[in-house]
Image: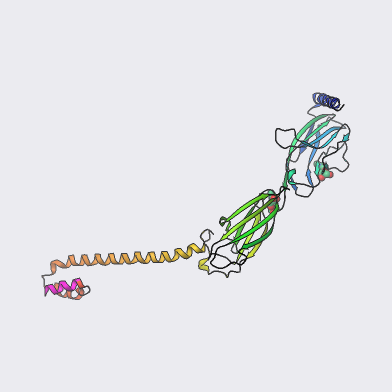
Amino acid sequence: MASSGIIVFIFTVLCICAVKSGFIKVECKAENVGHYGQQSLLECVVKTSSDVTDPNIRVVAWKKLTSPEDGGDLVLAFQRGKLDQPKRGYRFAEPSWNEKNMNVSLLITNTAVADNGDYKCIVITDSGDDSIVTTLKVQAKYSISTVYSIPEKIVPNKGSTLVCESHGGYPKGTLRWFDEENHDWTKSSEMEATQSDDGLFQLTSRLSLLGGSTFPKYTCAVFNASGGKVDEKTFETNIPPSSPLESPGSSGLLSPYTSKVVAPLVVIGSLIIGLLLLLLYKRRSQKTRRNSTAPLMGGRDAVPTDLEEGYNSPEDESINQDQS
Ligand SMILES: *[C@@H]1O[C@H](CO)[C@@H](O)[C@H](O)[C@H]1NC(C)=O
Ligand SMILES: *[C@@H]1O[C@H](CO)[C@@H](O)[C@H](O)[C@H]1NC(C)=O
C-alpha cells in the first residue's frame, strides 16, 4: 500500500521532471544566522519563469543534511496536498502556507546547536522542480560566570592562579586576560573548552601569576568565534600597584620580574667593563711613556720632566732612584 503509493509518487515526479523542468528555481539566502533558543529563518522562495501562470506547489521537502553524501533527515514535508506531521519545532515560516504560496521558508522555533548545518530544500510544482542547499549558522552568546583566585587570598611575592569561567556560547570562542593598562597576559594562561550535552561550550582559563609580578586588577574577556568581544569581568587582587619601573614593556611580554633581575645585571656588567677598559688604558699609557723617555735618560734636559711626571707611580720612582 505504502510502497505502491511511493511508486506512483516517484512516477509522477519523473513525468513532471521530464516535461517541465527548468521553469522554476528555488532561491535561498546562502547563509542564515540563527540564535540559540530563538527562532531561526531559512529563507527560500520559488521563482517561476514569466511564461508560467498560476503555479501550484505539489511537494516541498526540507531535509537536514548530516553529511554531504547522505539523503538527510526529513524535518518538514508537504506532499499530496497535505502537510506531513513535521518534526517538532519545524514549520513553514508563512503562518498559513498553502500550495499557492511561493515563500517556502523554513522556521525553526527553538534553535538548538544541533540545528547548525546544511539544509536541502526540494520543491516540485506543476511547472517544474528544483532543489537547493542552504546553511544555518547557530550562534549562542557567551557570558563570564566567574573569576576567582587560587588561593582565595593572594599573597604578594608568592605564585597564584586566576581562574575565569565562561559558559553558554557557540561556536567555540576564546578567553583572554588583560591588566589594567590593557597589556595582554593571555600567553601566561591556559584555556580549556568543553561541550555540554546541549552543544554549548564552557570555557575555562587559568592565568599563572608569578610572585612579584602581580597587578592590582586583571580583566578576563571572552571573544566569540569571529573575534568580537562579548563579555568581560574584572578581578581585584588587592596587591598595591607596583612602581612604574616594574611595569612590563609595551610588548607586554617582559614581566616585571625579568626587568627586576636584568636591570642590576646591566649596571654591574657595564661597571666591570668600564673598569677593565680603564686598567687597560693605564697600562698602555705607562708603557708608551717609558719607551719614549728611555733614550733621554742620560740627557740633563730629561731630568726635570722625569721628576715632574715620574713620581706618579712606584715604578717611575725606582727608575728615578736608579738614576741618582
Ligand atoms: C517569507 O516569509 C517569511 C515569514 O513570513 C518572511 O519573514 C520573509 O520575509 C518572506 N520572504 C520573502 C522573500 O517574501
Ligand atoms: C561576535 O560578536 C560580534 C560583536 O559582538 C557580533 O557582531 C558577531 O555577530 C559575533 N559573531 C559570532 C560568530 O558570534
For the C terminus, the quadrant is bottom left
- Of all residues, the one furthest to the front in this rendering is 151
**Which is the main secondary structure of the residues drawn in magenta?**
helix
Ligand 1's quadrant is: top right
Decide whether residue 272 is among the magenta residues: no
What is the quadrant of residue 308 in the picture?
bottom left
What is the quadrant of residue 23 in the picture?
top right
Q: Can residue 99 be seen in this view?
A: no
What is the quadrant of residue 77 in the picture?
top right
Residue 284 picture location, percent across and down: 24, 64
In this image, 174 relative to 130: left or right?
Answer: left
Considering only vertical position in the picture, is 242 above or below 183?
A: below
Extent of the magenta region: 315-324
Considering only vertical position in the picture, is 224 above or below 62?
A: below
Q: Nearer the viewer, residue 109 or 42?
A: 109
Residue 198 picture location, percent across and down: 73, 48
Residue 160 picture location, percent across and down: 57, 62
In this image, 144 relative to 52: left or right?
Answer: left
Residue at 68% x, 56% y: name it: 166
* Total residue callouts: 0
Decide whether residue 323 is among the magenta residues: yes
Considering only vertical position in the picture, is 29 above or below 280?
A: above
Q: Which of 101 and 313 is in front in this view?
A: 313
Q: Can residue 277 be seen in this view?
A: yes
Q: Nearer the viewer, residue 184 or 203?
A: 203
In this image, 54 relative to 239: left or right?
Answer: right
Residue 246 picture location, percent across and down: 51, 66
Residue at 41% x, 64% y: name it: 266
Q: Nearer the viewer, residue 320 or 206?
A: 206
